[in-house]
Image (cartoon, rainbow, N blue to C red):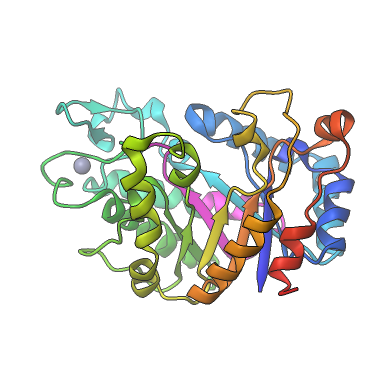
Amino acid sequence: MRSSVLIHPGELSPKWIDRLSSCGISALGIHPEGGSRAAESLDRLLDGLRAPAFRALLDTAAAKGLEIEYELHAAGWLLERGLFDAHPEYFRMNAAGERTPDRNLCVSCPDALQRLATRAAGLARQLYRSGSRFYFWMDDDRDAACHCPACRQYSPSEQQLLAVNAMLSEIRKGIPDAQLAYLAYFGCVEPPRRVRPAPGVFLEYAPFEKYVSANDPGRAGLIRQEAERIPELLACFGSSGAKVLEYWYDNSLFSDWKKPPRRFTPQGEVVRREVRQYRAMGFETISTFGCYLGADYEALYGEPDLTDFAAAVAGR
Ligand SMILES: [Zn+2]
């Protein structure tokens, strides 16, 4: 089955490229840091993609047979927050009824949706050596939907899908075989019902609650719901291209997103068991974050070990 590992662009190195290609991973996922500064980290990535040294690394990865993908929290870059003063109607209404540029957008505002889509098409063209699968995720938070009177009828999942459909339609004008991920994450694990995925939209399932709410008994229901929604999500989006994005090797999560990285011990048995489960459900691609395992990690603790992941996705 297809597999990929997502790492921060600043951690990409010849070592990482060798590690992925030598153990048979299909794709290298470039993932700039998310959170409230996602737009700045995407700008830094785009600067890097114009720099010969970084392009040479990506050339090496491609020469070794790795597909290149970019997985980005992109909403704040696609619809620039600085537009708020001139166009508050582009932005979401929070639960208190106030327009705010803090996250995402108002998907019922045609100009906002068009700007998002046009910039998404421009972004797709800037992603050096990218394959035709794109990942332009919405903002990284639980409460990030628009509550305006027009958007209120749509769930967070439906709002995301309206944005994804609009972006893909624009991207496909230049890249006809483009595909775009719907990220089933936080509240968006609830399958969309009033909005249907356009052709080329594929499911990307990221079970983040399982990790961030693991020690919170009050959120056990959210973790259960996250797992239980998988069959409905696959029914809605189809298994074709469906992808899991796991956190098995996400040492940024286990380091609480603070450097220096902590020592990381892969949970090999868990990885193997869960890969088998995802495969049986019908997912075609299995990915994991592999952040905070760069040169600084190696200097402290030595080479990270991807053996269990590589073996599990190879069916060994
Ligand atoms: Zn709205």
Q: Looking at this view, is 239 or 46 the one in front?
A: 239
Q: Looking at this view, is 89 or 147 the one in front?
A: 147
**Image location (x, y in percent) of residue 135:** 53, 54
Q: Determine whether, in the image, residue 246 is placed left or right of residue 25.
A: left
- Determine whether 316 is above or below 159 in the image: below
Whether residue 67 is visible here, answered yes or no, is: no
**Image location (x, y in percent) of residue 307:** 80, 58
Q: Determine whether, in the image, residue 93 is placed left or right of residue 257.
A: left
Q: Looking at this view, is 302 or 131 the one in front?
A: 302
Residue at horizontal 18 percent and vertical 39 percent from the top: 147
**Image location (x, y in percent) of residue 91:** 28, 35
Q: Quadrant of residue 24?
A: bottom right
Check the picture and name the quadrant holding the N terminus: bottom right
Residue at horizontal 88 percent and vertical 37 percent from the top: 302
Q: Quadrant of residue 132?
A: bottom right
- Range of residues picked out in magenta: 122-141
Check the picture and name the quadrant holding the C terminus: bottom right
